[in-house]
Image (cartoon, rainbow, N blue to C red):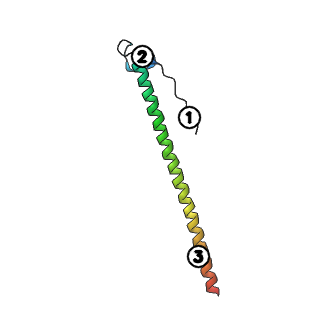
Amino acid sequence: MPEQALASVSVDDVRDVINVSSAEVPDAKVLKMIKRAEVTFLLNNEVRNFIHERDFQLQLSSIHWLIHLSFSLILDSKQQDNEAHL
């Protein structure tokens, strides 16, 4: 699955949203906040992708066993019909 591109967020964008000045919150602190948000976003996406993949595998496995069971029942039924005709 291709990695999603994150929107570019500047230090000034963050300061504007939380209504603080550069004197109140230095660049290094804002950059750390941006990095934490990015890591959290990426981890959430990884977890979501993992869950979707596991759901898909479970559904595929269920379909496989339904086909296997159906095929076995058909074979058993045919075998019983053949034995009844003997």
Q: Earlier in the sequence, mark 1 or mark 2?
A: 1
Of badges 2 and 3, nearer the viewer stands: 2
Helix, strand or loop status at disc 2: helix
- The N terminus lies in quadrant: top right
For the residue carrying disc 2, how many other residues have a C-alpha within 10 Å: few (<14), some (14-19), or many (20+)?
A: some
Q: Amino acid at mark 1?
A: Glu
For the residue carrying disc 3, how many other residues have a C-alpha within 10 Å: few (<14), some (14-19), or many (20+)?
A: few
Residue 6 lies, in percent from the top left, at 52, 28
Residue 76 lies, in percent from the top left, at 59, 76
Q: Which mark is residue 47?
A: none
Q: Which mark is residue 27?
A: 2
Residue displayed at 55% across by 63% down: 65
Name of the residue lying farthest toward the top: 23
Name of the residue lying farthest toward the left: 24
Residue displayed at 52% across by 26% down: 7
Q: Amino acid at mark 3?
A: Asp
Q: CA distance from mark 2 to mark 3?
A: 73 Å
Tag 1–tag 2 contact (CB < 8 Å): no
Residue 54 lies, in percent from the top left, at 50, 49
- The C terminus lies in quadrant: bottom right
Q: Amino acid at mark 2?
A: Asp
Dividing the picture into quadrants, the one containing residue 11 is: top left
Dividing the picture into quadrants, the one containing residue 18 is: top left
Helix, strand or loop status at disc 1: loop
Residue annotated with mark 3: 76
Helix, strand or loop status at disc 3: helix
Residue 39 lies, in percent from the top left, at 45, 31
Residue annotated with mark 1: 3
Compared to residue 55, the image places residue 34 above or below, namely above
Residue displayed at 56% across by 67% down: 69
Q: CA distance from mark 1 to mark 2?
A: 27 Å
Q: Earlier in the sequence, mark 2 or mark 3?
A: 2
